[in-house]
Image (cartoon, rainbow, N blue to C red):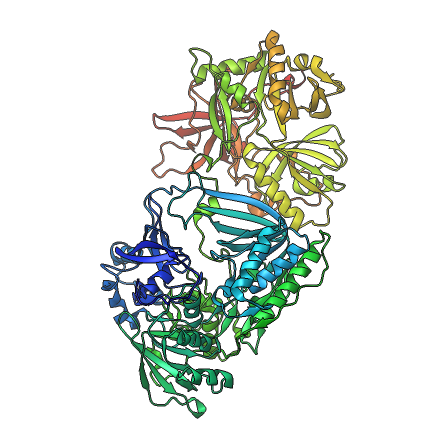
């Protein structure tokens, strides 16, 4: 171990040494180290190269906001991940890591030539270059750009890890485990509320982990922290989740948490997930995320060895690591002074503290004098030197009127900087909460929120330990009270007495004053995307005034840290360039996730066989046992046909069709989408959603429903039964159930929130058994109770509730075959039992199970369409021959206005028609194009295409549907269908091929 470890400092377990590698070199660390702290302990600052200029980059922070120290990490067995933040990656025995964005090596990177040519790569250069010669784009420019794009190497092996997900509900969710978060969790937990406390670090404690000397209620901070964690662990109503990041805050207090479970383990237990997504619905949320230290903007501020002062203090006090042997601090805030004091007390030489402020608190100067630290008040930093690590810093006094004096160079191997602190308001912003500008602190603070949420501590602008504890305790108590459960709600929050409180004053500015040409200064604002202050000023000169436009032109704030370090500095520079106050310039939008999150975490269990789950009906097992051949239909596995010995599909389907037409067939229709629409305004809601009228439909009757989009095109259809004045049983297509429900919810919540209607998906609640054929009534009559099945009492398109085979049923008298038909809805758990009972009793009628292919043939013979097969999103009701399903006198329904557009009324629109081939044995290909003149030159004028085509055993010939321009006006005309074997001739006909008089429906 190098001499950068300091004895007696830190919380790492020095009794357990761990070996890891970085770029093939072996290093040692301790249990509790991050990769960043372990590398710094070994004197390693250079960890990567910047994205655009390939400048050497070092560790800048100690947290998840790190923009520079992104590495490739290999946990073995195909577990390689690019862009892992070294500041949060925990070291374990055998960890292998590598630097990124360099070739052939980190110290000698050929891409660094970009740094010498940096004037050619100013903001927006990609919009101004690569324009000529035009032929170079495909063969030169694009391949080079694509090869250079991105950071890190994408994994090539399949991800061997598993990922988990979990839903949770709680009274109070506390995000952030620092002083404010712990105080909030304690108050809420003691009240009896159910509490979840999460923090992204491996230990709960936040900034207290780097504050060993502070005293809280008479205890040293770490002792208080140990007792508090023990108290929380002892509360059965409190769940504490370390290594858990709140990545997104959504509507109705829904928060996504990403929990890292095994990344820190050398050996992963069998079956243990790598990460878990917690989907938390909380009655109240307390955001105690703290604040993020801002860098200063000056030339050379990105050199390895230049880091945030708070990070240096964390590495010293939490990890026992000094970041250098001779340190200089440059600051506009008190924080860097305290970091310098801690380093000096630990034996590190602090060469100077450079403070850009004209005056600083006298106690800080006195403390510096006592530690023999040189102080330069009212000075600035104008540059740094050092090829792969900072070796010196150039400092200048700033006189009256901002005039920069002569330079002095101070040797150092680490430069600490602090530009103050920015409250972490990202999650609050996810909720579209309002932000207010605090002029005194030069920061955005949370304003009026839209969720049941409160902020506490530094995230609210309340800096310092005592303020954080008091604010957190008050927030936790108030959240518990507002959650409204538990005997202890409403108690007074605990009081906190803090000794060793640190001062927390400072100023915020733009770039530091300099005596050099600012147009050539490499003063970085966004470290990861290589955005300099001069780039932002260039964007303003080129006409960009909105911060959102400046962001996209320069890419400031578009890196993986989402501008956590760069946004406020970028705003300050833009504000100065625009001569407008920062609030007038605006703030960019913060979006989930808060930190980069693996795809695996979002996928959860949905990988491999579970990625797209095959849904099966309760009757599916019977079909499998009886030899069904299956096809996928949307997410469902459906019986395609039931071949008997020696039958191919053609023969099986012909047999099944004949059985239905002549006697009785049984079909599993459970996959149909089903939505229960309930409420006093249910009929009005139906009237507004569907094209036809529903208010006068009597209970016990059904109606075909046609659903359009706002564009007037057909979206879905289905038979809908009115069970009562306030209840409808809606069916949808198999593939359209979720889409239709989502569409209905959208209209109900956004357009008609005044309607008293509730929507419930019941697709899996009901098994549906379709009995079709002349003997259907005869089969079910003995088994039905409470329903008169006579033709007069229960005609076609009737619905009733009763019992069948002793179980509850919703019985529909409907047909998708043109034969006498019933659809028997029974609770799903009874589906197979009722099916088997009916199948056994139906043997005397020669009952025949049939599949989806037979269903398609039978419905086509009868002229019934399938939405999504015979429609393609561009057909109106009239195009599909369904004008009769449109309520002409209705004042409005979804899509009504679009139907009156002139182009929707054109006579030459494509219309759905029937086709009969001149050769009855020819079955046209579905999707085959249709032309009027087969002899016209290529490319031919295609007037339509075939949508459905089958062999009809009933007719002894093929039948087909097609959409053809002006199709209905061409009845009896001949069209031509080019297919691979030849051009086939067909005649346009009606779509009804069997029983046009509908006599069989009442057989």
Instruction: Please indicate, yes or no, whether residue 18 appears anywhere in the rendered image.
Output: yes
554 or 433, which lies in front? 433
Relative side of 780 to 247, left or right: right
Residue 853, x across and y down, in percent: 50, 22
Residue 168, x across and y down, in percent: 59, 46
747 or 908, which lies in front? 747
Which quadrant of the structure image shows residue 445?
Answer: bottom right
Which quarter of the rendered picture does the C terminus lie within? top right
Relative side of 886 to 937, left or right: right
631 or 591, which lies in front? 591
Residue 175, x across and y down, in percent: 56, 58
Which quarter of the rendered picture does the N terminus lie within? bottom left
Relative side of 456 to 948, left or right: right
994 or 158, which lies in front? 158
Q: How many labels does the image show?
A: 0
Which quadrant of the structure image shows residue 687?
Answer: top right
Vertical position of residue 241 compared to residue 365: above or below: above
Vertical position of residue 464 compared to residue 699: above or below: below
Which quadrant of the structure image shows residue 147?
Answer: bottom left
Residue 110, x across and y down, in percent: 23, 63
Vertical position of residue 721 compared to residue 305: above or below: above
Vertical position of residue 676 compared to residue 315: above or below: above
Instruction: Please indicate, yes or no, whether residue 452 appears anywhere in the rendered image.
Output: no
């Amino acid at each position: 171990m190098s001499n950068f470890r300091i004895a007696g400092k830190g919380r790492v377990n020095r009794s357990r040494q761990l070996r890891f590698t970085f770029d093939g070199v072996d290093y040692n660390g301790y249990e509790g180290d991050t990769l960043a702290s372990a590398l710094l302990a070994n004197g390693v600052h250079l960890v990567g190269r910047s994205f655009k200029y390939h400048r050497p980059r070092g560790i800048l922070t100690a947290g998840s906001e790190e923009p520079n120290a992104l590495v490739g990490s290999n946990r073995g067995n195909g577990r390689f991940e690019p862009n892992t933040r070294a500041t949060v990656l925990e070291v374990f025995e055998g960890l292998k890591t590598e630097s990124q964005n360099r070739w052939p090596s980190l110290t000698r990177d050929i891409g660094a030539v970009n740094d010498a040519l940096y004037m050619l790569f100013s903001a927006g250069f990609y919009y101004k270059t690569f324009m000529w010669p035009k032929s170079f784009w495909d063969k030169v420019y694009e391949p080079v750009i694509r090869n250079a794009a991105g950071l890190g190497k994408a994994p090539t092996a399949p991800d061997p890890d598993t990922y988990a997900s979990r839903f949770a509900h709680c009274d109070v969710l506390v995000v952030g485990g620092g002083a404010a978060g712990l105080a909030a969790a304690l108050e809420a937990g003691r009240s009896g509320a159910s509490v979840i406390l999460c923090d992204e670090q491996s230990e709960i404690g936040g900034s207290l982990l780097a504050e060993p000397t502070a005293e809280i209620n008479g205890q040293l901070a770490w002792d208080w922290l140990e007792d508090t964690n023990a108290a929380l662990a002892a509360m059965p109503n409190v769940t504490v989740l370390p290594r858990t990041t709140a990545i997104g805050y959504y509507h109705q207090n829904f928060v996504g948490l990403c929990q890292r479970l095994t990344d820190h383990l050398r050996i992963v237990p069998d079956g243990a997930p790598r990460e878990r997504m917690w989907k938390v619905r909380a009655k109240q949320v307390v955001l105690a995320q703290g604040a993020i230290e801002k860098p200063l903007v000056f030339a050379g501020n990105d050199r390895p060895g230049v880091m945030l002062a708070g990070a240096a203090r964390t590495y010293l006090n939490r990890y026992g690591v000094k970041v250098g042997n001779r340190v200089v601090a440059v600051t506009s805030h008190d924080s860097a002074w305290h970091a310098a004091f801690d380093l000096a007390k630990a034996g590190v030489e602090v060469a100077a503290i450079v403070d850009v402020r004209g005056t600083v608190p006298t106690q800080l100067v006195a403390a510096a004098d006592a530690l023999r630290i040189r102080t330069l008040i009212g000075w600035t930093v104008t540059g740094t030197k050092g090829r792969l690590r900072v070796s010196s810093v150039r400092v200048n006094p700033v006189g009256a009127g901002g005039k920069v004096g002569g330079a002095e160079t101070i040797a150092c191997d680490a430069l600490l900087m602090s530009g103050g602190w920015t409250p972490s308001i990202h999650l609050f912003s996810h909720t579209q909460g309002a932000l207010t500008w605090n002029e005194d602190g030069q920061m955005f603070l949370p304003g009026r929120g839209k969720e049941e949420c409160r902020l506490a501590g530094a995230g609210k602008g309340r800096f310092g330990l005592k303020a954080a504890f008091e604010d957190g305790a008050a927030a936790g108590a108030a959240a518990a009270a507002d959650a409204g459960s538990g005997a202890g709600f409403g108690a007074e929050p605990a009081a906190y007495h803090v000794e060793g409180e640190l001062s927390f004053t400072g100023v915020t500015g733009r770039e530091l004053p300099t005596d050099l040409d600012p147009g050539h200064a490499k003063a970085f604002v966004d470290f990861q995307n290589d955005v300099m202050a001069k780039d932002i000023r260039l964007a303003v000169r080129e006409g960009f005034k909105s911060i959102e436009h400046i962001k996209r032109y320069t890419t400031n704030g578009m890196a993986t840290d989402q501008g956590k370090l760069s946004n406020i500095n970028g705003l300050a520079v833009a504000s100065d360039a625009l001569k407008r106050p920062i609030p007038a310039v605006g703030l960019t939008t913060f979006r989930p996730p808060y930190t980069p999150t693996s795809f695996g975490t979002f996928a959860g269990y949905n990988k491999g066989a579970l990625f797209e789950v095959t849904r099966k009906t309760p009757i599916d097992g019977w079909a499998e046992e009886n030899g069904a051949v299956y096809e996928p239909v949307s997410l469902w596995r459906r019986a395609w046909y039931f071949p008997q010995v020696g039958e191919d599909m053609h023969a099986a389907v012909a047999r099944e069709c004949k059985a239905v037409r002549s006697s009785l067939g049984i079909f599993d229709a459970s996959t149909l989408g089903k939505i229960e629409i309930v409420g006093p305004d249910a009929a009005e809601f139906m009237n507004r959603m569907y094209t036809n009228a529903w208010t006068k439909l009597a209970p016990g009757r059904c109606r075909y429903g046609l659903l359009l989009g706002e564009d007037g095109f057909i979206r879905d259809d289905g038979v809908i039964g009115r069970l009562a004045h306030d209840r409808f049983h809606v069916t949808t297509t198999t593939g359209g159930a979720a889409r239709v429900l989502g569409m209905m919810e959208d209209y109900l919540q956004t357009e008609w929130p005044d309607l008293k209607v509730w929507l419930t998906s019941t697709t899996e609640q009901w098994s549906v058994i379709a009995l079709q054929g002349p003997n259907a009534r005869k089969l079910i009559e003995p088994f039905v109770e409470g329903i008169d099945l006579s033709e007069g009492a229960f005609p076609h398109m009737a619905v009733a509730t009763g019992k069948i085979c002793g179980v509850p049923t919703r019985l529909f008298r409907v047909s998708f075959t043109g034969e006498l038909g019933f659809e028997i809805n029974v609770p799903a758990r009874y589906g197979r039992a009722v099916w088997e009972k009916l199948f056994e009793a139906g043997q005397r009628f020669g009952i025949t199970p049939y599949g989806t292919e037979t269903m398609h043939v039978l419905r086509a013979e009868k002229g019934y369409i399938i939405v999504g097969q015979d429609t393609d999103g561009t057909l109106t009701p009239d195009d599909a021959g369904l004008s009769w399903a449109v309520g002409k006198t209705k004042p409005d329904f979804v899509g009504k206005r679009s139907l009156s557009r002139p182009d929707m009324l054109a006579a030459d629109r494509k219309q759905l028609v029937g086709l009969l081939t001149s050769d009855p044995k020819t079955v046209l290909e579905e999707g085959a194009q249709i032309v009027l003149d087969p002899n016209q030159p290529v490319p031919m004028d295609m007037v339509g295409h075939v949508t459905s085509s089958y062999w009809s055993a009933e007719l002894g010939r093929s039948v087909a549907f097609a959409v053809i321009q002006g199709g209905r006006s061409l009845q009896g005309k001949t069209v031509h269908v080019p297919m691979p074997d030849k051009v086939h001739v067909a005649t346009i006909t009606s779509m009804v091929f069997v029983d046009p008089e509908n006599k069989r429906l009442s057989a």
